[in-house]
Image (spheres, rainbow, N blue to C red):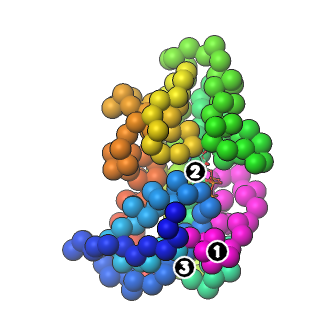
Amino acid sequence: MRLVRRSRSRSSNDRDHGAGVLVAATGNAGKLAELERLLDGLGWEVVAQSALGVEPPPEDGLTFVENAIAKARNAAERTGRPALADDSGLVVDALGGAPGIHSARYAGPDAGDAANNEKLLRALAGVPEAERTARFECAVAWLRDPRDPVPLIASGTWTGRVLEAPRGTNGFGYDPLFLDPGTGRTGAELDPGRKDALSHRGQALRELRRMLAGAAI
Ligand code: ITT
């Protein structure tokens, strides 16, 4: 994984925001790759917080937005740079919204994607197809500094359902089990550009880009 990457190109619709360093407040390599793609062309040098020695804060908020702000604030505080964080997760109707904000650690504090996916399949064993509806949620927060009183907040939702067996090898997390009904493909069967066009994270980052275009950043 490259930890520092300069955006390649700038479209005429993107304002020049100063091409400074933007700290990506995430330790999730799959998420970081998507954020880098979705920030491409803005002129920011995206640096992962781990490359700057930043440890993540506790995620004890009750909402995706609270956790996104906490992660971005922590990174901005420790680096003195603007920071962007994403808090996201899979909300499954038949499980009362679980794993939700606990998606990353659904199967335990050190659980990886495979264990989380296995737990999800076990929890949904016997649940018929029509009741396996789910959605990915994503909230992103951009803080100019740790005390920024008006952070930019954007969100996105991707609706689909949970399959009974994994399909595909792209993406990360629950992608192999999440079916996008419009394409008939799982998140892990979609190529990266197609996932970005549909996903909760893609929606949130496009909204954020619209905000940045009108903000004094
Ligand atoms: P950071 O907090 O360091 O960013 P994290 O993985 O702990 O990394 P979250 O707390 O936001 O991040 O949890 C997000 C989890 O939700 C992630 O680990 C996946 O299990 C799931 N998830 C979110 N977006 C996803 C996507 O696009 N595809 C598949 N799974 C996703």
In the rendered structure, which disc, 1 or 3, sits on the residue that comes first in sequence?
A: 1
Which residue carries the number 3 mark? 82
Asked if labels 2 and 3 touch by Cβ distance under 8 angstroms, the answer is no
Q: CA distance from mark 3 to mark 2?
A: 20 Å
* Residue 168, disc: none
Which residue carries the number 1 mark? 75
Inspect the magenta stretch and tell me whether residue 64 lies in it: yes
Inspect the magenta stretch and tell me whether residue 56 lies in it: yes
Write the start and end of the magenta stretch as one range: 48-72
Q: Using the rendered image of the protein, determine whether residue 150 is visible from the camera's viewpoint.
A: no
Residue located at (65% from left, 60% from top)? 66
In the image shown, does 87 or 51 lie closer to the viewer? 51
Tag count: 3
At numbered mark 2, what does the secondary structure look like: helix, strand or loop?
strand
Q: CA distance from mark 1 to mark 2?
A: 17 Å
Q: Please identify the residue farthest to the left as the structure is shown.
A: 12
Which of the 4 image quarters holds residue 45? bottom left
Quadrant containing the C terminus is bottom left
In the rendered structure, which disc, 1 or 2, sits on the residue that comes first in sequence?
A: 1
Q: Is residue 209 left or right of residue 21?
A: left
Residue located at (66% from left, 30% from top)? 118
Amino acid at the residue labelled 2: Ser
Q: Using the rendered image of the protein, determine whether residue 125 is visible from the camera's viewpoint.
A: yes
Locate residue 194, reporting x and y percent: 33, 45
Which residue carries the number 2 mark? 88
Label 3 Cα crowd, 10 Å radius (few <14 / some 14-19 / many 20+): many
Amino acid at the residue labelled 3: Pro
Q: Is residue 47 above or below residue 161?
A: below
Q: Is residue 188 left or right of residue 151?
A: left
At numbered mark 3, what does the secondary structure look like: helix, strand or loop?
loop
In the image shown, does 24 or 2 lie closer to the viewer? 2
Locate residue 187, reporting x and y percent: 44, 38
